[in-house]
Amino acid sequence: MSAIESVQSPTTKADWQALADAVIPSLETRAFIDDAFVDAVSGETLATLNPASGETLAQVASCDAADAELAVAAARSAHARGDWSRLAPAERKRVLLRLAELMEAHKNELALLDTLDMGKPVSSSLGDIEGAIGCLRYTAEGIDKVYGEVAPTGDDSLGLVLREPLGVVASIVPWNFPLMMTAWKIAPVLAAGNCVILKPSEKSPLSALRLAQLAKEAGLPRGVFQVLPGYGHTVGKALALSMEVDCLAFTGSTQVGKQLMQYAGQSNLKRVYLECGGKSPNLVFADCKNLDQVAQHAAAAIFHNQGEVCIAGSRLLVENSIREAFVDQVVEAAKAMQPGDPLDPASFMGAMVDETQYRSVLDYIAKGREEGARLRAGGKALEGPGYFIPPTIFDGVTPAMTIGREEIFGPVLSVFGFDGEEEAVQLANDSDYGLAAGLWSQDIDRIMRLSRKLQSGQVFVNNWAGPDMTVPFGGVKQSGNGRDKSLHSLAEYTELKTVWMALTP
Ligand code: NAD
């Protein structure tokens, strides 16, 4: 039995530490290109750090344009070979379900890698891995139930509408949910018969490389799934500018999303699907029942995953008649959500991903103070080592303040007051973003009225972020244009082809 297998079911901090001690010496740190683990062509590496300690975990291959060229050539040749792109959907399903099984068998290890790499609590990482496995299973199960169409023609013709894979897709993902965002971005792409080149974030490449080992074991053919760790401005940019990549499937910041659209325009007009940032409003009306429970949800909506969540409920909009008392309840709820050792399963929050993100969040907190918001909780980093920031709550925020407009991507809640529906909607929609919105009320007419008026890809009514794989996930405005999850995601990675036949009636 290997050292990793000997830590069967970790439940305590000591168990997780033992698993970490077993996993770290055997980390895969090379790129996965054309079915082989290889060093970057340049030989360069980049350090990936454990943000809970600030220590280097591993030196990982730092790919650039030369590696991108090799991976694109391997993917093109795999696509042309057709042993994946033309494989019967039911067969592709079988391989992807096998990959899901392998992920299940290694889920503790995968969760641990995300926790070590980006600082989130291990209990949270375990939930992410379940989500990633569920995404793979759902999408694999879906692919042999998607039909083409027969057009409503006259008897003298037959119009077929076929769905074909796009070809080569570059999936570029962020660090905040490393493996779950990866699953959302690769499962529909692979299920639809495409080849994927995955570019994980330079801040969290470890679980993607472990996934490559499992994908090889599951039987994905050569060149169909490849992983290029490295920086965005090197290997990410090279993939985005490639004339041989047919589509970019991106999750990350709005700023980089805009650059990718430019790269597509400068190269081959590849499709660009973007899932970008957010500044999501969470609207609480005075008619809510159980305000203490709503306060728990409102706190979790921002402090889960240290606030490093695209759909974080970072703007809390509260009807003025209950605001003072409700904010007291949110402050109380936040006391139980303090950061702790990410390897401790009892920790609610972990460490910020790195020093840059930590400094950026602290700068926003300083701006909140300078611009006159009222600090109700937190506001000061914990003593080192590691990059820990406690739940921070500002009341009296206005749309003119920086913390009321910009995505902070950290545990900072901005509370606004409103009087009546009209002002609530006006404040909620006063944003460049439109990823998610929350609505807490007992009035079904109001719920339906506002669900339609809120400019958002998704509206959570009397909950926050509960939806499963059956519904689409994505944004409007500058939050992006793509949709992850649900069967709609499969459609994004297929091309419609018309076959028009003349018949003798
Ligand atoms: P980021 O945009 O800095 O990086 C995302 C990915 O893009 C990384 O892999 C990075 O290396 C790569 N990249 C950077 N510059 C590039 C370039 N010039 N060309 C090609 N690739 C490049 O974002 P991040 O800091 O990793 O993640 C945080 C952001 O992601 C937040 O804005 C968050 O809201 C967003 N996000 C959105 C969703 C969603 O579903 N809408 C989900 C998670 C995170």
Image (cartoon, grey):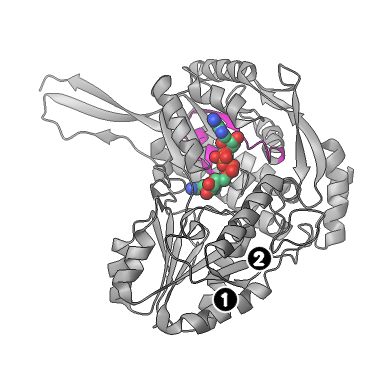
Image coords of residue 395 (percent x, y): 52, 72
Residue 206, x across and y down, in percent? 72, 39
Amino acid at the residue labelled 2 = Gly
- The reply, left or right, for residue 408 in relation to residue 165 is right
Residue 10, how many percent across, how many down?
A: 81, 58
Q: Which residues are magenta?
A: 184-206
Instruction: Determine whether 334 is above or below 80 in the image.
Output: below
Q: Amino acid at mark 1?
A: Val
**Viewer-proximal residue, 129 or 326?**
326
Estimate the x, y position of residue 336 in percent, counting from the top left. Answer: 68, 74
| Marking on residue 330 | 1
Can you tell which quarter of the image residue 9 is in? bottom right
Q: Above or below — where is 260 with respect to 486?
A: above
- Going 26% across and 23% down the picture, which residue do you hit? 499
List the residue tagged with mark 2: 379
The CA distance from mark 2 to mark 1 is 15 Å
Name the image quarter holding the N terminus. Answer: top right
- Asked if disc 2 is less than 8 Å from ligand 1, the answer is no
